[in-house]
Image: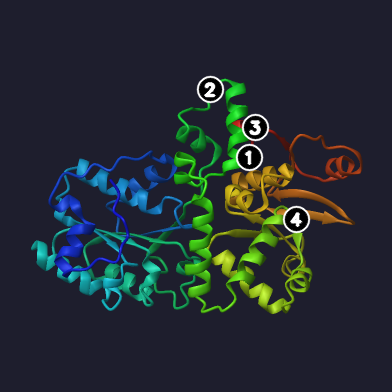
Amino acid sequence: MFINKVIFMGTMKEILEKLNPWWNEEFNFKSIERKKYLDILKEQIDKKDINILTGIRRVGKTTLMYQLINFLLERKVNPKNILFLSLDVIYFKDYFIQDIISEYMKLNRISNKEKVYLFLDEITYKDNFNQELKNLYDFGNYAVFASSSSAKVLKDKKAFLTGRARYYEIHPLDFEEFCVFKGHSFKSNLPVLKSLFEEYMKMGGMPEFVLTKNPSYLSELLELIVSKDIVMEHDLKNKQLIFDLFRLLCERVGKQISYNKLSKILDVDNETVSKYVSYFLDTYLFDLIEIKGKLNQRILGKKKLYCIDVGLRNVVTGFKDLGSVYENLVYHVIKGEKPNFIYVDGMEIDFCFKDVLIEAKYGVVLEGKQKEFFDSLKFKKKIVANGVDFFLEKKC
């Protein structure tokens, strides 16, 4: 059972009841659990901190909220003390969050002393969401879980949420999760895992796409993000330019990017390219990593680019340049370490962090001058990632 986000017509009571069916009927949300996130969130369920789930659209943030609601119901929490709101529902446009909550508490006769579990989907649809979340934290008896598909939730310019919020970036499926979604585990034999990994390289890790294999799913998702989260959000006129830039960036996954070259191809200025790339970063479509070096080198030097999901990249470029696809997947294993890359006199090594050095190779060996350069670098741990073994052993 899943609640479709539609433009509801009716009274506040009717809309709230439609969004919260567990008030009036048995609710049993069936889905595959992503334990690495769900277990952490369960530990936060009774704490006062505001918990904010971020990440690209349709990566599973809302599903995690429903799974937490299931968890609360299994704990015999009063269903009426659980409120889920889709804040992108147009009916809520002119209401403050607290106004909706007040109406809900009156409707269900919830006293101010009772603990209420709030699940606020797409929180950034409210312009003043930071202040509203602060007020919920300071003045209410709430456990708050909010989600956002925009990184602007992290840009709390007035620091309303400092010390009040915990942030969790939800990523596409890693390889272990992909295997689970495909009905397998890391205990499968190696030929099966190699076959699954080849499929992972093609499909990527968007959960619904992995389950349904709907050929139009990723294209429709990309259209939604570009149209709604970039073009409409920033009132842009040239939608095709955004798509063209996205295609160019997908072709450059794992490579150093030059805004100057991109601006010449697109016949726009560098500032426009830089601004549009920032929109892609804000919607989680891409990440950039810096060169290893002093601060001025990291700031002024070229950046390497990675896509949030190789499936989205492949739907644009086709399934080719498998070395870049593989490098992109390796990046997501170590993303949390905030890696840099090394580039000296035309020689490049893909990743480094702390005392770890990694070069990603797929179907080829590290040899020649690059191997000499790799061997000469002083790191305690040196890894040549090649094939599925890196993902099975999790050497980092």
Q: Which mark is residue 388?
A: 3
Q: Alpha carbon of mark 2 to alpha carbon of mark 1: how far? A: 22 Å
Q: CA separation, marks 4 and 3?
A: 22 Å
Q: Earlier in the sequence, mark 4 or mark 2?
A: 2
**Where is mark 2, residue-wise?**
188
Looking at the rendered structure, the secondary structure element under dot 4 is loop
Between disc 4 and disc 3, whose residue precedes? 4
Query: Residue 255 got which mark?
Result: 4
Q: Residue at x 62, y 54 (%)?
A: 307
Tell me the kind of residue under disc 4: Lys
Name the amino acid, label 2: Ser
Residue 103 locus on image (x, y percent): 15, 70
Q: Is mark 3 in CB contact (under 8 Å) with mark 2?
A: no
- Look at mark 1 in the image and give the residue it sits on: 396
Packing grade of label 1 (10 A; few <14, some 14-19, many >=20) is few
Q: Which of labels 2 and 1 is toward the front? A: 2
Q: Are marks 1 and 4 in contact (CB under 8 Å)?
A: no
Q: Earlier in the sequence, mark 2 or mark 1?
A: 2
- The amino acid type of the residue labelled 3 equals Val
Quadrant holding the C terminus: top right
Q: CA distance from mark 4 to mark 2?
A: 34 Å
Image quadrant occupied by the N terminus? top left
Quick check: marks 3 and 1 in contact, CB under 8 Å? no
What percent of the width, then of the height, locates residue 150?
Answer: 47, 65
